[in-house]
Amino acid sequence: MSYPTAAPSQGRAATSAQAATQARAAAPALAALPLPERALLLRGLSHALGENAAPLAAIAEDETRLGMERLRSEIRRTQAQLQMFADVIEAGAFLDVVIDPPDPSAQPAPRPDIRRMLVPLGPIAVFSASNFPFAFSVLGGDTASALAAGCPVVVKAHEGHPRLSDLAGELAAEILPAGVLTVVHGREEGRRLVTDPAIRAVGFTGSTSGGRALFDLANSRPDPIPFYGELGSLNPVVVTRAACRARGTDIVREYIASVALGQGQFCTKPGLLFLPADHALHARLRQEITAVPPAPLLGLWISAAYHATLEQLATHPAVRPLHLTHKPDDPRTSTPALLTTSAKSLRTHPELLRECFGPASLIVTYTATEDLLETLQALPAGLTATVHGQEPEDEALAQRLTATMQAGRLIWNGWPTGVAVTAAMHHGGPWPATTSPLHTSVGNRAIGRWMRPVAYQNMPEGLLPAPLRRANPWNVPQQVVGSRPIPDGKI
Amino acid sequence: MSYPTAAPSQGRAATSAQAATQARAAAPALAALPLPERALLLRGLSHALGENAAPLAAIAEDETRLGMERLRSEIRRTQAQLQMFADVIEAGAFLDVVIDPPDPSAQPAPRPDIRRMLVPLGPIAVFSASNFPFAFSVLGGDTASALAAGCPVVVKAHEGHPRLSDLAGELAAEILPAGVLTVVHGREEGRRLVTDPAIRAVGFTGSTSGGRALFDLANSRPDPIPFYGELGSLNPVVVTRAACRARGTDIVREYIASVALGQGQFCTKPGLLFLPADHALHARLRQEITAVPPAPLLGLWISAAYHATLEQLATHPAVRPLHLTHKPDDPRTSTPALLTTSAKSLRTHPELLRECFGPASLIVTYTATEDLLETLQALPAGLTATVHGQEPEDEALAQRLTATMQAGRLIWNGWPTGVAVTAAMHHGGPWPATTSPLHTSVGNRAIGRWMRPVAYQNMPEGLLPAPLRRANPWNVPQQVVGSRPIPDGKI
C-alpha cells in the first residue's frame, strides 16, 4: 500500500523523523502544563470526537466495515476513555508523590529530605490497531494515557483506516499544541519511529509476529526503550462437567455470541472452549454457529490471513470440522467456523495453539480432570482465562483450574469479550499475551507505562516541581512516609 | 577463574538448570504463604546475618578488602533492608488491591465485579554486585525484594566473593524452604540462568557492557522476560559560580571524600565535577586528593580495569592530569587520581564520557552558562545529578540545570554517594543508567519489579485470593473505586 507524499496536512507528518523531532520540541511545555490544563486538552479531544462523530463514523465504516452502530458506540467509548484520563490527572494520585521527611539526628549521618514523583518519559510512538479504529487508534487508549502522562505522541496509523487516522489527527491538531500529536503512515516509517532517538517508549496493539519484530527493534537500539506490545491471546474457556450438565445450552449460545461478536476480531475472542468429551452439544453448537450471518472483515489482508489460518487448522489430521461455511463470493466476507480436537491432541500438536483472528474457535474435548489440567498447563499465557463452573460443587476443581491457567484476567461464569474500562481492569498478561507482564493497556493504570520516577534530595522549595512542594500548590495527594531508620544507610 | 564441581552444599546448586528447576518447584508454596509467614522468613534471614556477622565479615574482608568497619556496617544495612521488606509485606499495600464494585444497572450490559492485585512473577535470577558483598549480593536488596514479592531466587554469585556467597546461601538454606534461594557460580551458568525457561525476570547490578549482554540475552528468549539492570553512571556534580566563590574549599573537601569513599567503588561516585573555568581551587584539589590513602581495590580485575581506563583518560590529548599517584607495587592497590578538561572538550570528545570505577574523577571547567548547559545536554542519563548553588541568587540558573540533567535522583548541595534506603528513594534512571527507567533497585518500591497484575472478574468468594476477598481475611488495604461508567464499555 502506498501513501501520498504531498505536503502533510495539519496533524500529519511526511516522515517519522519530522514527527519525532516536533514531538521532542513539544515535550517540555506539555510536561510543564498544570494538570487542569492538561485535562482540558483531553476533554477537548473527547468533545471533538463527539462533534464530528457523523463524518468520523462514515469514514470508519467505509474503511473498516464494522457497522455504524458499533462504530458510534466505539466513538462514545473513546470519548469516555479520554474523559477518564482527564479525571485521573485532575485527581493527581497518578503522580505517586511520596515524601520522606529529613531526619537530622539519624546516625551515622543526617538523613536528607527525599521527595519522589513520576515524570513523563518523553515522546511516545503509538502503533494503532486494525480492529478498534477509535478506541485503540489515533485518539485511543494508548494516546489518551500518554497525553495524560504528559508525553507527546506520534501515531503510526493502521493501514486499514488511513483516512480516518488523518481526520482524527486533524481534529487533534486544532486542539493540541503543535507537535503534541502527529500521525505518520507506512510500515517503513513505523520502523523508523521505533529507532528514532527522540522516541522514549512504544505502545503497540497487533499481531505477535509484528509486535515481536518491533519489540526486537526497540531493544536493539543503542539506547533501548520500553516497548509495550499487546499481542495475541487464545482466551481459553473451560466448562466443567457440572456446568455443562446444568447450563450447556446457555453456555453454547453465549459462547457463539462471544466468538461472533465483531466478527471475532477481538483480542479477547474465546479461541478455545474446553468441553467434557461426552458432551451432547454438537447439534446445538452447529445450530448456533450456522445462525451467525456472514459479514465483511476489516480488510482483505485480514480475511486472507483468517482463511489461511482456518484452512491450516481445519485440515490438520488431529482436527475435525464441526462447522465450516462455504467460502463466500466476496473474499472480504467472513466464514464463521467451529473446529474440534481432543485435549491430548492439543498437547501433542502445539502448532494448533495459534490465534485465528476472526469468527472461528476450537472446541477441545477432555476426559478426566488430569487430562484437562495437563493440557491447560501446556497453553501459552493469555490476556484472559475463563471457567464456567457450578457452585459450590466445583470449588475445589476451579481452584486448581485458576491456579493452572496463566492470564492477566481470570473470569468466572462470563466471557472474555467486553473489557470494562475501569480502575481495577487489567488488560495484559505474561508473554506471549504482551511484551511486558507488569502493564495494562486498558483502564486507569495504563498511564503508568509512560512515566518514570525521579527523587529530589534536599531540594529547596523553589526548585521542586509543584507536586512535590511543601506548599502543595497543585493540591495533589502527597504520601508522607516515616521510614524506619536504616542503620548506616548512607553507605 | 574456576570453581569446584563437587557435590553442592546446602543452598548451592552445581548448575543453573538445577537451581531454576528447584525454584520453579518452590514457587507455588512460597506465593501461597500468608504474608506474616513470608515476613518471618525475611526477619529470619536478617537475624541469621546478625548472628553470623563475625565469620561473614571475616570472609568478606578476605575476599573484598573493603575493611571490617565498612563490612560490619554493610551487614547492618542488609539486615535493615530485609526488615524493611518484612514491614512492607506485613502492611499489605504492596499488593495494590483495587476493587471495582459491580454495576448491575450499567448500560448496555451490567458491569461485572472486578478485583485486581499483584501476584509474584515466579523464579527470579539475581546477579550480585562486586562492590556490595552483602547489600547487593546473595541476601541483598534484589533478593530481599524478590522474596518479599513471593518469588524464589537463584543468585549468580559474584566472582569477587564466591566463598562469602556460599556461606550466605548456606545460612539462607537453614531458614527458607528448599529451592527458595540457591546460589550458582560462574559466568556461563549465569548466562544459562538468563535463558532458563523457569526464570521469569532478572535483576542485575554491574557494568554497562555486562548488563547489556545479559539484557540482550533476556530479550532474545523465545519468551522475553523483564531484565532490570542497574548499570553505570557518571553522576555529574555542577558547582555554580556563586557556590564556588562562597564555599569552594568546603565543596572540594566533600567532593574528594565522596570520590574516595569505598575507594570510589560506588555506582554513585561523582565522576564529573563542573567548576567555573576561573576557579582557584587547583592547590586545594591536589592537597585533598593527595591525602587519600592508597588502599586495595575489590580485586585484581577491578584494579586492572581501573588503571587501564585511567590511563586512557589521562593520556587523552584533551585531558590534563591534576593529580596522578605513582603506580603502586601491589597491583591491587588504588592510585587516587584527578583529571581535568574543558566543557567544550567534553562535548567534542564523547569518548571521555566513560565511567572509571575507582577513586578517580574528571573536573570539567566551563566558561559561560550556555557552555555549561550545552555540555550537560550532551551527557548520558545517570543515576544521579547534583547541583551546588547559592540561594536565592542561583534559583533561575538551578531551574535550568535541573531541567537539563537527566537522572533518577536530583540532589541539591549534597553528594550522590549515600543512597538512603527509604520509601521515597529512587535508585534508577533512563538508559544507560539502567535498562528499565520505570524501576528502582533501592527502597520499598524495588518490590514492584517482581510482580504482575491479575484481574479477577465475577469470582466467587471461595475462588478469590485472600487479599481480594470481601471478608478481607488478611486485612490488607483494599481500594474500592467507584469508576465513572463508560458508555458501551463492553465492546
Image (cartoon, coloured by chain):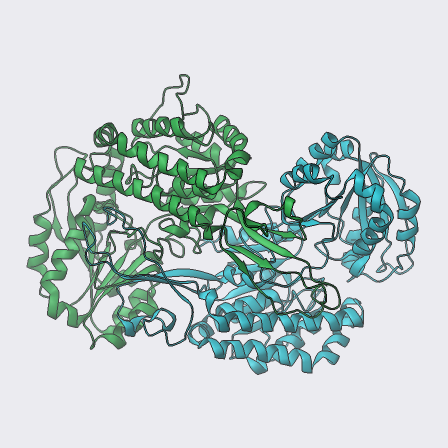
Chain colours: A green, B cyan
Q: Is residue B265 visible?
A: yes
What residue is shown at x 18% (from left), y 49% (from top)? B108
Identity of the residue drawn at 24% across and 32% down: A53
Of the pair B392 and A40, the residue shown nearer to us: B392
Q: Residue at x 71, y 78 (%)?
A: B53
Q: Position of residue B356 (x, y in %)?
A: 76, 49
Report x, y in % for residue B69: 79, 71
Quadrant housing residue B84: bottom right
**Residue A185 visible in the current orientation:** no
Q: Is residue A24 above or below residue B131?
A: above
Q: Tell me the quadrant of the picture where the N terminus of chain B can be found.
A: bottom right
Residue A111 vertical placement versus B389 (above, below): below
Q: Is residue A253 above or below residue A197?
A: below
**Direction from residue B18 to residue A343 in the image, left or right:** left
- Image-based side of B333 in relation to B157, left or right: right
Q: Nearer the viewer, residue A451 or B153?
A: A451
Report the front residue among A102 and B251. Answer: A102
Relative image position of residue A407 (x, y in whole percent): 35, 60
Q: Quadrant of residue B264?
A: bottom right
For residue A231, side relative to residue A344 (left or right): right
Residue A437 screen position, x and y as percent: 43, 56
The residue that appears at 41% across and 25% down in the rendered structure is A12
Q: How many marks?
A: 0
